[in-house]
Amino acid sequence: MYKLEVNNIIKNFASRRVLRKVSFSLQTGDSLAVVGKNGSGKTTLLKVIAGLIRASKGTVAYSGPNGKLSRDELQSSLSYVGPEMTLYDALTAEENLKFFATMRGLAWHLEESDKLLSKMGLNGRGRDKYGAYSSGMKQRLKCAVALLNEPHYLFLDEPTSNLDEDGKQIVGDIIERQKENGILIIATNEQKEYGLAEKLYQLDD
Amino acid sequence: MPKNSISLMTKAFAVLKKDMQCEFRTRYALNAIMLFGITTLTVVSFSVGQKNLPAEVHAALFWIIIFFSAMSGLAQVFIREEEAKTSTVLRLTASPTAVYIGKLTFNLFLLFFLELIISPLFILMTDVEVRNILLLATVLALGAIGLAGATTLIAAIISKSGAKGALFSVLSFPILLPLLMGAIKATTVAFSDTGGGFSDVSSELQLLISYGVIMITASLLLFEYVWEE
Protein backbone atom coordinates (compact mmCIF):
# COMPACT_ATOMS: atom_id res chain seq x y z
CA MET A 1 0.00 0.00 0.00
CA TYR A 2 1.44 3.35 -1.08
CA LYS A 3 0.42 6.62 0.57
CA LEU A 4 0.75 10.33 -0.09
CA GLU A 5 0.17 12.91 2.62
CA VAL A 6 0.06 16.61 1.81
CA ASN A 7 0.04 18.77 4.95
CA ASN A 8 -0.72 22.50 5.05
CA ILE A 9 1.14 23.39 1.86
CA ILE A 10 1.67 27.11 1.40
CA LYS A 11 3.42 28.48 -1.67
CA ASN A 12 4.26 32.14 -2.18
CA PHE A 13 5.74 33.71 -5.29
CA ALA A 14 7.22 37.00 -4.00
CA SER A 15 4.33 38.65 -2.15
CA ARG A 16 1.63 36.61 -3.93
CA ARG A 17 0.27 33.59 -2.08
CA VAL A 18 -0.66 30.91 -4.63
CA LEU A 19 -1.40 27.96 -2.35
CA ARG A 20 -3.12 28.43 1.01
CA LYS A 21 -2.76 25.53 3.45
CA VAL A 22 -3.52 22.69 1.04
CA SER A 23 -3.95 19.35 2.84
CA PHE A 24 -5.15 15.93 1.74
CA SER A 25 -4.05 12.32 1.91
CA LEU A 26 -4.34 9.55 -0.68
CA GLN A 27 -3.49 5.87 -0.83
CA THR A 28 -3.26 3.19 -3.51
CA GLY A 29 -6.51 3.11 -5.45
CA ASP A 30 -7.32 6.78 -4.78
CA SER A 31 -7.66 9.39 -7.47
CA LEU A 32 -7.99 13.14 -7.04
CA ALA A 33 -8.93 15.89 -9.47
CA VAL A 34 -7.43 19.27 -8.56
CA VAL A 35 -9.70 21.88 -10.07
CA GLY A 36 -9.79 25.63 -10.20
CA LYS A 37 -9.64 28.61 -12.54
CA ASN A 38 -6.57 29.65 -14.52
CA GLY A 39 -3.95 30.92 -12.09
CA SER A 40 -5.48 29.21 -9.09
CA GLY A 41 -2.29 27.17 -8.50
CA LYS A 42 -3.10 23.71 -9.92
CA THR A 43 0.22 23.33 -11.74
CA THR A 44 2.11 24.80 -8.78
CA LEU A 45 0.48 22.28 -6.43
CA LEU A 46 1.37 19.35 -8.68
CA LYS A 47 4.95 20.60 -9.01
CA VAL A 48 5.28 21.00 -5.24
CA ILE A 49 3.95 17.47 -4.69
CA ALA A 50 6.25 16.05 -7.40
CA GLY A 51 9.22 17.79 -5.76
CA LEU A 52 9.93 20.05 -8.72
CA ILE A 53 9.56 23.22 -6.63
CA ARG A 54 9.77 23.74 -2.90
CA ALA A 55 6.78 24.70 -0.79
CA SER A 56 7.11 27.90 1.27
CA LYS A 57 5.59 25.99 4.18
CA GLY A 58 4.09 22.55 4.78
CA THR A 59 5.19 19.00 4.00
CA VAL A 60 4.65 16.27 1.42
CA ALA A 61 5.24 12.71 2.66
CA TYR A 62 5.44 9.57 0.56
CA SER A 63 5.35 6.09 2.06
CA GLY A 64 5.26 2.55 0.74
CA PRO A 65 4.95 -0.98 2.16
CA ASN A 66 8.31 -0.58 3.95
CA GLY A 67 7.68 2.88 5.36
CA LYS A 68 8.91 6.27 4.16
CA LEU A 69 10.20 6.19 0.57
CA SER A 70 13.83 7.06 -0.05
CA ARG A 71 14.74 9.59 -2.69
CA ASP A 72 15.65 6.85 -5.19
CA GLU A 73 12.50 4.83 -4.43
CA LEU A 74 10.38 7.92 -4.95
CA GLN A 75 12.14 8.78 -8.21
CA SER A 76 11.48 5.30 -9.55
CA SER A 77 7.81 5.25 -8.51
CA LEU A 78 6.65 8.75 -9.52
CA SER A 79 5.75 10.16 -12.92
CA TYR A 80 4.50 13.58 -13.93
CA VAL A 81 3.18 14.89 -17.22
CA GLY A 82 2.77 18.65 -17.57
CA PRO A 83 2.18 21.07 -20.42
CA GLU A 84 5.39 23.03 -19.79
CA MET A 85 7.72 20.03 -19.95
CA THR A 86 9.05 18.60 -23.17
CA LEU A 87 11.21 15.72 -24.36
CA TYR A 88 14.26 16.04 -26.62
CA ASP A 89 13.37 17.52 -30.01
CA ALA A 90 16.56 16.27 -31.66
CA LEU A 91 15.99 12.65 -30.58
CA THR A 92 13.55 10.18 -32.11
CA ALA A 93 10.65 8.81 -30.06
CA GLU A 94 12.53 5.53 -29.60
CA GLU A 95 15.72 7.34 -28.52
CA ASN A 96 13.71 9.40 -26.03
CA LEU A 97 12.11 6.25 -24.59
CA LYS A 98 15.45 4.45 -24.41
CA PHE A 99 17.12 7.41 -22.68
CA PHE A 100 14.44 7.82 -20.02
CA ALA A 101 14.20 4.04 -19.47
CA THR A 102 17.97 4.00 -18.77
CA MET A 103 17.63 7.00 -16.44
CA ARG A 104 14.95 5.13 -14.51
CA GLY A 105 17.17 2.03 -14.31
CA LEU A 106 14.91 -0.05 -16.55
CA ALA A 107 15.97 -2.70 -19.04
CA TRP A 108 15.06 -1.33 -22.45
CA HIS A 109 13.92 -3.55 -25.30
CA LEU A 110 12.81 -2.43 -28.73
CA GLU A 111 9.76 -4.73 -28.54
CA GLU A 112 8.65 -3.11 -25.27
CA SER A 113 9.09 0.31 -26.81
CA ASP A 114 7.08 -0.73 -29.90
CA LYS A 115 4.33 -2.07 -27.63
CA LEU A 116 4.22 1.15 -25.62
CA LEU A 117 4.20 3.34 -28.74
CA SER A 118 1.44 1.21 -30.22
CA LYS A 119 -0.60 1.55 -26.99
CA MET A 120 -0.26 5.34 -27.30
CA GLY A 121 -1.39 5.27 -30.94
CA LEU A 122 2.09 6.08 -32.24
CA ASN A 123 2.86 2.81 -34.00
CA GLY A 124 5.20 3.21 -36.93
CA ARG A 125 6.34 6.65 -35.72
CA GLY A 126 9.09 5.52 -33.34
CA ARG A 127 11.89 6.62 -35.65
CA ASP A 128 10.49 10.11 -36.19
CA LYS A 129 12.10 12.92 -34.25
CA TYR A 130 10.09 14.26 -31.31
CA GLY A 131 10.57 17.76 -32.75
CA ALA A 132 8.70 16.70 -35.88
CA TYR A 133 5.69 15.46 -33.91
CA SER A 134 2.42 17.39 -33.71
CA SER A 135 1.43 18.77 -30.30
CA GLY A 136 -1.03 15.90 -29.76
CA MET A 137 1.60 13.29 -30.63
CA LYS A 138 4.06 15.00 -28.28
CA GLN A 139 1.50 14.74 -25.49
CA ARG A 140 1.06 11.01 -26.23
CA LEU A 141 4.83 10.40 -26.14
CA LYS A 142 5.12 12.30 -22.84
CA CYS A 143 2.47 9.94 -21.44
CA ALA A 144 4.45 6.95 -22.81
CA VAL A 145 7.59 8.18 -20.98
CA ALA A 146 5.53 8.60 -17.80
CA LEU A 147 4.30 5.01 -18.05
CA LEU A 148 7.77 3.46 -18.57
CA ASN A 149 8.26 2.80 -14.85
CA GLU A 150 4.65 1.73 -14.14
CA PRO A 151 4.43 4.45 -11.48
CA HIS A 152 2.77 4.12 -8.10
CA TYR A 153 2.20 7.89 -8.19
CA LEU A 154 1.01 9.46 -11.44
CA PHE A 155 0.41 13.22 -11.69
CA LEU A 156 -1.20 14.54 -14.86
CA ASP A 157 -1.48 18.27 -15.49
CA GLU A 158 -4.07 19.09 -18.18
CA PRO A 159 -3.64 15.54 -19.58
CA THR A 160 -6.02 15.88 -22.52
CA SER A 161 -4.77 19.23 -23.81
CA ASN A 162 -3.97 19.09 -27.56
CA LEU A 163 -5.41 15.58 -27.84
CA ASP A 164 -8.01 14.39 -30.37
CA GLU A 165 -10.83 12.02 -29.37
CA ASP A 166 -8.62 8.92 -29.80
CA GLY A 167 -5.93 10.54 -27.67
CA LYS A 168 -8.47 11.42 -24.97
CA GLN A 169 -9.62 7.78 -24.97
CA ILE A 170 -6.01 6.62 -24.51
CA VAL A 171 -5.53 9.02 -21.58
CA GLY A 172 -8.86 7.81 -20.17
CA ASP A 173 -7.54 4.21 -20.27
CA ILE A 174 -4.30 5.27 -18.54
CA ILE A 175 -6.31 6.98 -15.82
CA GLU A 176 -8.54 3.93 -15.29
CA ARG A 177 -5.52 1.60 -14.99
CA GLN A 178 -3.76 3.96 -12.59
CA LYS A 179 -6.88 4.16 -10.40
CA GLU A 180 -6.70 0.38 -9.97
CA ASN A 181 -2.96 0.11 -9.27
CA GLY A 182 -1.71 3.35 -7.80
CA ILE A 183 -2.37 6.94 -6.81
CA LEU A 184 -3.53 9.44 -9.41
CA ILE A 185 -3.80 13.24 -9.31
CA ILE A 186 -5.15 15.18 -12.29
CA ALA A 187 -5.09 18.95 -12.56
CA THR A 188 -7.74 20.23 -14.89
CA ASN A 189 -10.16 23.06 -15.55
CA GLU A 190 -12.28 21.01 -17.96
CA GLN A 191 -15.57 20.28 -16.19
CA LYS A 192 -15.96 17.10 -18.26
CA GLU A 193 -12.81 15.71 -16.63
CA TYR A 194 -13.90 16.27 -13.03
CA GLY A 195 -15.55 12.84 -13.11
CA LEU A 196 -12.32 11.07 -14.13
CA ALA A 197 -11.24 11.04 -10.48
CA GLU A 198 -13.13 9.89 -7.43
CA LYS A 199 -12.19 12.84 -5.21
CA LEU A 200 -12.22 16.56 -5.98
CA TYR A 201 -10.04 19.31 -4.54
CA GLN A 202 -11.13 22.85 -5.39
CA LEU A 203 -8.43 25.52 -5.33
CA ASP A 204 -9.59 29.06 -4.58
CA ASP A 205 -8.43 32.06 -6.60
CA MET B 1 9.42 -2.75 -18.36
CA PRO B 2 11.50 -4.97 -16.08
CA LYS B 3 13.70 -3.26 -13.51
CA ASN B 4 17.40 -3.65 -14.03
CA SER B 5 20.37 -2.73 -11.88
CA ILE B 6 21.80 -0.04 -14.12
CA SER B 7 24.93 1.50 -12.65
CA LEU B 8 25.54 5.19 -12.10
CA MET B 9 28.22 5.21 -14.80
CA THR B 10 25.82 3.64 -17.33
CA LYS B 11 23.33 6.41 -16.58
CA ALA B 12 26.07 9.05 -16.86
CA PHE B 13 27.11 7.54 -20.19
CA ALA B 14 23.47 7.71 -21.35
CA VAL B 15 23.41 11.45 -20.49
CA LEU B 16 26.68 11.94 -22.41
CA LYS B 17 25.38 9.95 -25.40
CA LYS B 18 22.12 11.90 -25.42
CA ASP B 19 24.00 15.24 -25.31
CA MET B 20 26.35 14.08 -28.09
CA GLN B 21 23.40 13.03 -30.27
CA CYS B 22 21.61 16.35 -29.68
CA GLU B 23 24.83 18.30 -30.31
CA PHE B 24 25.71 16.52 -33.56
CA ARG B 25 22.18 17.10 -34.84
CA THR B 26 21.96 20.77 -33.85
CA ARG B 27 25.61 21.90 -33.37
CA TYR B 28 24.72 24.80 -31.03
CA ALA B 29 27.76 24.57 -28.76
CA LEU B 30 30.22 23.36 -31.42
CA ASN B 31 29.34 26.22 -33.76
CA ALA B 32 29.54 28.76 -30.94
CA ILE B 33 32.97 27.76 -29.64
CA MET B 34 34.53 27.13 -33.06
CA LEU B 35 33.22 30.41 -34.49
CA PHE B 36 34.54 32.35 -31.50
CA GLY B 37 37.83 30.46 -31.45
CA ILE B 38 38.62 30.88 -35.14
CA THR B 39 37.54 34.56 -35.17
CA THR B 40 39.68 35.46 -32.15
CA LEU B 41 42.61 33.48 -33.51
CA THR B 42 42.38 35.28 -36.85
CA VAL B 43 42.31 38.70 -35.15
CA VAL B 44 45.32 37.76 -32.97
CA SER B 45 47.31 36.40 -35.91
CA PHE B 46 46.63 39.48 -38.05
CA SER B 47 47.71 41.86 -35.30
CA VAL B 48 50.72 40.06 -33.80
CA GLY B 49 51.33 37.08 -36.07
CA GLN B 50 54.49 38.37 -37.73
CA LYS B 51 56.01 39.94 -34.62
CA ASN B 52 58.60 38.19 -32.53
CA LEU B 53 56.80 38.24 -29.20
CA PRO B 54 58.07 36.78 -25.94
CA ALA B 55 56.80 33.30 -24.97
CA GLU B 56 54.80 34.82 -22.06
CA VAL B 57 52.72 36.92 -24.47
CA HIS B 58 52.10 33.99 -26.81
CA ALA B 59 51.04 31.80 -23.87
CA ALA B 60 48.69 34.51 -22.53
CA LEU B 61 47.12 35.09 -25.96
CA PHE B 62 46.68 31.34 -26.44
CA TRP B 63 44.82 30.87 -23.14
CA ILE B 64 42.71 34.01 -23.70
CA ILE B 65 41.47 32.43 -26.94
CA ILE B 66 40.78 29.09 -25.23
CA PHE B 67 39.06 30.77 -22.24
CA PHE B 68 36.70 33.01 -24.22
CA SER B 69 35.90 30.32 -26.80
CA ALA B 70 35.04 27.96 -23.95
CA MET B 71 32.87 30.65 -22.33
CA SER B 72 30.78 30.91 -25.49
CA GLY B 73 29.87 27.22 -25.59
CA LEU B 74 30.30 25.35 -22.31
CA ALA B 75 27.20 26.79 -20.64
CA GLN B 76 24.99 25.44 -23.46
CA VAL B 77 24.95 22.05 -21.81
CA PHE B 78 22.51 23.32 -19.15
CA ILE B 79 21.06 26.39 -20.88
CA ARG B 80 19.71 24.14 -23.64
CA GLU B 81 17.94 21.92 -21.06
CA GLU B 82 16.30 24.97 -19.42
CA GLU B 83 15.37 26.79 -22.64
CA ALA B 84 13.97 23.66 -24.29
CA LYS B 85 12.13 22.83 -21.03
CA THR B 86 13.58 19.33 -20.93
CA SER B 87 15.11 19.90 -17.50
CA THR B 88 11.80 19.08 -15.73
CA VAL B 89 11.63 15.50 -16.99
CA LEU B 90 15.39 15.07 -16.54
CA ARG B 91 15.10 16.19 -12.89
CA LEU B 92 12.26 13.76 -12.31
CA THR B 93 13.97 10.75 -13.82
CA ALA B 94 17.73 11.09 -13.49
CA SER B 95 20.10 11.01 -10.54
CA PRO B 96 21.85 14.41 -10.15
CA THR B 97 25.27 12.73 -9.98
CA ALA B 98 24.68 10.92 -13.29
CA VAL B 99 23.58 14.20 -14.86
CA TYR B 100 26.68 16.04 -13.59
CA ILE B 101 29.14 13.33 -14.69
CA GLY B 102 27.48 13.09 -18.12
CA LYS B 103 27.51 16.85 -18.66
CA LEU B 104 31.07 17.24 -17.33
CA THR B 105 32.31 14.56 -19.75
CA PHE B 106 30.45 16.24 -22.61
CA ASN B 107 32.11 19.59 -21.80
CA LEU B 108 35.49 17.84 -21.57
CA PHE B 109 35.05 16.38 -25.06
CA LEU B 110 34.00 19.81 -26.33
CA LEU B 111 37.13 21.42 -24.83
CA PHE B 112 39.45 18.69 -26.15
CA PHE B 113 37.95 19.20 -29.60
CA LEU B 114 38.42 22.99 -29.32
CA GLU B 115 42.04 22.57 -28.22
CA LEU B 116 42.69 20.04 -30.98
CA ILE B 117 41.60 22.57 -33.61
CA ILE B 118 42.87 25.82 -32.04
CA SER B 119 46.34 24.66 -30.87
CA PRO B 120 47.82 23.71 -34.28
CA LEU B 121 46.18 26.73 -35.91
CA PHE B 122 47.62 29.04 -33.23
CA ILE B 123 51.12 27.55 -33.68
CA LEU B 124 50.80 27.89 -37.45
CA MET B 125 49.36 31.41 -37.55
CA THR B 126 51.52 33.04 -34.86
CA ASP B 127 54.79 31.31 -35.78
CA VAL B 128 55.36 30.31 -32.17
CA GLU B 129 57.82 27.49 -31.71
CA VAL B 130 56.82 24.71 -29.32
CA ARG B 131 59.97 23.49 -27.56
CA ASN B 132 58.27 20.88 -25.39
CA ILE B 133 55.19 19.41 -27.07
CA LEU B 134 54.58 16.79 -24.35
CA LEU B 135 54.49 19.52 -21.71
CA LEU B 136 52.07 21.57 -23.83
CA ALA B 137 49.80 18.53 -24.30
CA THR B 138 49.83 17.86 -20.54
CA VAL B 139 48.98 21.49 -19.72
CA LEU B 140 46.19 21.47 -22.31
CA ALA B 141 44.71 18.26 -20.85
CA LEU B 142 44.91 19.47 -17.24
CA GLY B 143 43.63 22.91 -18.23
CA ALA B 144 40.62 21.34 -19.97
CA ILE B 145 39.82 19.19 -16.91
CA GLY B 146 39.96 22.22 -14.60
CA LEU B 147 37.97 24.42 -16.99
CA ALA B 148 35.27 21.78 -17.47
CA GLY B 149 35.16 20.92 -13.75
CA ALA B 150 34.49 24.52 -12.70
CA THR B 151 32.33 25.71 -15.58
CA THR B 152 29.91 22.76 -15.62
CA LEU B 153 28.66 23.65 -12.14
CA ILE B 154 28.58 27.39 -12.96
CA ALA B 155 26.60 26.57 -16.12
CA ALA B 156 24.00 24.76 -13.99
CA ILE B 157 23.78 27.80 -11.66
CA ILE B 158 23.35 30.42 -14.39
CA SER B 159 21.03 28.35 -16.63
CA LYS B 160 17.97 29.50 -14.66
CA SER B 161 18.89 33.20 -14.69
CA GLY B 162 18.04 35.94 -17.17
CA ALA B 163 21.38 37.24 -18.48
CA LYS B 164 22.93 33.81 -18.88
CA GLY B 165 25.88 34.54 -21.18
CA ALA B 166 27.20 37.59 -19.33
CA LEU B 167 26.70 36.00 -15.93
CA PHE B 168 28.57 32.85 -17.01
CA SER B 169 31.74 34.80 -17.90
CA VAL B 170 31.48 37.09 -14.87
CA LEU B 171 31.09 34.18 -12.43
CA SER B 172 33.64 31.96 -14.15
CA PHE B 173 36.49 34.45 -14.48
CA PRO B 174 37.42 34.87 -10.79
CA ILE B 175 37.01 31.15 -10.16
CA LEU B 176 39.14 30.23 -13.18
CA LEU B 177 41.85 32.84 -12.55
CA PRO B 178 44.21 30.53 -10.57
CA LEU B 179 43.83 27.85 -13.24
CA LEU B 180 44.56 30.33 -16.04
CA MET B 181 47.62 31.74 -14.24
CA GLY B 182 49.05 28.24 -13.77
CA ALA B 183 48.25 27.19 -17.34
CA ILE B 184 49.81 30.37 -18.81
CA LYS B 185 53.00 29.96 -16.76
CA ALA B 186 53.38 26.29 -17.75
CA THR B 187 52.61 27.06 -21.42
CA THR B 188 55.25 29.82 -21.35
CA VAL B 189 57.86 27.21 -20.45
CA ALA B 190 56.63 24.93 -23.28
CA PHE B 191 56.98 27.86 -25.73
CA SER B 192 60.23 29.25 -24.26
CA ASP B 193 63.53 29.26 -26.19
CA THR B 194 65.32 27.71 -23.25
CA GLY B 195 63.09 24.67 -23.67
CA GLY B 196 62.28 23.90 -20.03
CA GLY B 197 60.95 20.54 -18.92
CA PHE B 198 58.34 19.19 -16.48
CA SER B 199 60.63 19.80 -13.49
CA ASP B 200 60.63 23.56 -14.24
CA VAL B 201 56.86 23.78 -13.91
CA SER B 202 56.20 21.17 -11.24
CA SER B 203 54.44 23.68 -8.97
CA GLU B 204 52.20 24.87 -11.86
CA LEU B 205 51.35 21.27 -12.78
CA GLN B 206 50.56 20.50 -9.13
CA LEU B 207 48.28 23.55 -9.10
CA LEU B 208 46.47 22.40 -12.26
CA ILE B 209 46.01 18.85 -10.92
CA SER B 210 44.81 20.06 -7.49
CA TYR B 211 42.48 22.61 -9.10
CA GLY B 212 40.83 19.93 -11.26
CA VAL B 213 40.44 17.49 -8.36
CA ILE B 214 39.04 20.16 -5.99
CA MET B 215 36.62 21.59 -8.56
CA ILE B 216 35.23 18.21 -9.65
CA THR B 217 34.91 16.95 -6.05
CA ALA B 218 33.23 20.17 -4.87
CA SER B 219 30.92 20.18 -7.88
CA LEU B 220 29.90 16.56 -7.29
CA LEU B 221 28.99 17.45 -3.69
CA LEU B 222 27.18 20.69 -4.55
CA PHE B 223 25.49 19.79 -7.82
CA GLU B 224 22.48 18.11 -6.22
CA TYR B 225 21.55 21.36 -4.42
CA VAL B 226 22.03 23.47 -7.55
CA TRP B 227 20.12 21.04 -9.78
CA GLU B 228 17.10 20.73 -7.50
CA GLU B 229 15.88 24.32 -7.40
Image: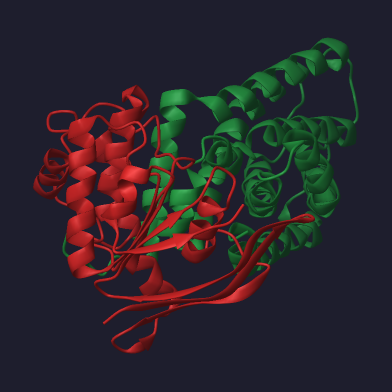
Query: Which residue of the protein is positioned furthest toward the bottom in this rendering?
Result: A66
In the image, is residue A79 above or below residue B172? below
Along the line of sight, which residue is nearer the eye, A30 or B42? A30
Q: Residue A55 placed where, x, y %?
A: 62, 66
Seen at 12% across and 39% down, the residue is A118
Q: Which chain is green?
A: B
In the image, is residue A67 above or below residue A26? below
Seen at 49% across and 41% down, the residue is A84
Q: Residue A48 placed where, x, y %?
A: 54, 62
Q: Quadrant of the C terminus of chain B?
A: bottom right
Seen at 33% across and 37% down, the residue is A139
Q: Quadrant of the N terminus of chain B?
A: bottom left
Along the line of sight, which residue is nearer the eye, A105 or B108? A105
Along the line of sight, which residue is nearer the eye, A153 or B57? A153
Res. A99 visible in picture: no
Res. B9 visible in picture: yes
